[in-house]
Amino acid sequence: MNKPTKNMLTLVAIVAAIFIPTYIAIGSYIGAQFAPVDEKTITKLEITDVGGNVYSLMADNPAQAVDIAGFVKINDRAIEQPSLPDPLLGADYFEFKYYSYDRTQVYKYYFNENAGEAYFVDANGTAYHISESDAEAFLSTKYARALYDTTSFPQMTVSERTINPTEGDWVYQTYSGDYVALDDIVVEEPTEIVYQMKGAFALSFDNRPDFCNVTIKDGDNIVYSDSYDNIANADLEGRTIDVLVEAKWYESDTEACYGSAVYKFKAKILLPAVFYLGKTEIEPGEFVVISAKNVDDPRAITFTSEPDIGFTPTFFEDGRYTRALVPVPMEFEGNEVKFTCTYGEVTQEMNLDITEKKFGNSFLDISATVANQTRTETTIKNFNDTMAPIIAVTESTPLWEGTFHEGTAGGNVKIGFGRYCTISGTGETYRHPGCDYIVKLNENIMAMNNGKVVYVGYLDLPGYMVVIDHGLGLKSWYCHLNSTAVKVGDTVNKGDVIGYAGMTGFTARENCHIAVSVYDVPVSQYKLWDEGVIMTK
């Protein structure tokens, strides 16, 4: 062999020594991508069942590693097939993702109620038949639960909320006839949550138990202990109770499952809301009281009127009742108003008859000079702006008692509520929102009823004025005073002196204007003198 040839062979040998291991490694890697999964190299297995539920098994978890090894053995014992049987083409399958250190292989497993017809397709697309015994073993695992409709632990619902049991067990039968117990039932200790039941004690199960016993305690006293079927006989109105429910489901020819559960929780029975009108007939410019029972949250009451009276009442708790004052404006035209109140699942309509009333005319002998100083767009706006926050706030309980005082000793009304008043000096006509009394200078002006003083001050329109809040939006107004005898925050009783008659503000002589309103709606005080505020008791 000549020297050039020998050198060439040496070079080829060197190149081969360098690259052959690389080629071998590449070939081994490519081959490994399509080699069957190896138990020793698997780090993770992710199973997605036919219902879309995902189970993640980690090889470093001893219990899960056993399951992974079992699935690999199923693969090893399976027999290769020419193809997947036609009935399984397009069928639902379990997806197994086997993760090794540097690769992921996806296998598709086809299991059904016939354990002898189980197959899988590996990452290369090759089909295998799984032995019947291996298929039966898989069908008895928790990973196959999606194939059965008896594996869900029954859910109990109270007031649209699911309650977990404090104890529970559930067993279902697989296609192979084995019985499997659920090992993932969610149990928890009782909480202090009070479940509100509207109308009656009611439980709801998505799988009705064959046996259900209920024990109810009010404090230390057992007030009911019997079958749930007889719960309607228990007197549970308005109580906060401790409930123990014991439920059992029996195996039967139609139900291949059984189990039991114990539930403990607190509940309160809320009877359906009921609404009442204090009066069923009033005149325009008067108000009516709506009372309600079985209302826990007055803010949740909705109200409408037909025809629309332009007022939305605010409801307040009053002992066992909930109440609201509803005024019908003096301008209302019609013979009936329909009120609709809704609370929870209850919607109730109430008809209020409106008796026709004719309001007369009055002539005010007030000069243009006085009117232009005290009753103008500016003074009216200033009055409204100042009173808006006073009107908006009220005591949440009724402070008044019995009938109302007129506010003066003489009780001589010069101009009554709701009349059309024409000002001599300007010709302007407006509706009178209260009563003007004939009084003497510095005559005592008295509180119409018990209440809290919420305004004392001077404004151009009313002159010196006192406003008393009687609760629930009801206020009384005392205007054109010469001086006042109370301060904001004072508590007054019916008949207490709150000021002295004068001729301040929009008036031409000694005068006391006394008015009543529900929030910002003027209402007549006439019936209050004799009847007070009529409420359903």
Image (cartoon, rainbow, N blue to C red):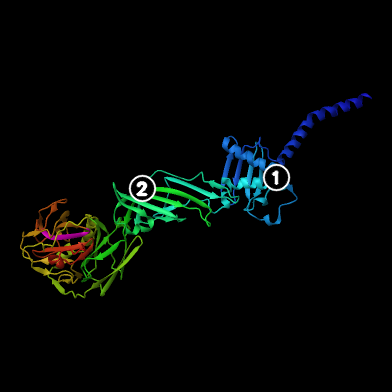
**Quadrant location of the N terminus?**
top right
Q: Residue furthest right?
A: 1
SS label for mark 2:
loop
* Relative horizontal placement of residue 336, taking residue 489 as reference (left or right): right
Q: Residues within 10 Å of mark 1 (few under 14, many from 20)?
A: some
**Does label 1 or label 2 sit earlier along the sequence?**
1
Q: Position of residue 191 (x, y in %)?
A: 37, 45
Q: Which mark is residue 229?
A: none
Q: Position of residue 331 (x, y in %)?
A: 24, 71
Q: Which residue is mark 1?
A: 78
Query: Magenta segment range?
Result: 472-481
Q: Which residue is mark 2?
A: 193
Residue sitting at x 45%, y 46%: 168
Q: Verify whether residue 474 appears in magenta.
A: yes
Q: Position of residue 442 (x, y in %)?
A: 6, 59
* Front residue (pair 189, 321): 189
- Magenta span: predominant SS is strand
State whether residue 219 appears in this view. Answer: no
Total label count?
2
* Front residue (pair 331, 65): 65
Looking at the image, residue 227 lies above or below residue 431 = above
Q: Which quarter of the figure has residue 276?
A: bottom left
Q: Verify whether residue 460 appears in magenta.
A: no
Q: Position of residue 61 (x, y in %)?
A: 57, 35
Q: Residues within 10 Å of mark 2 (few under 14, many from 20)?
A: few
Tags 1 and 2 touching, CB below 8 Å: no
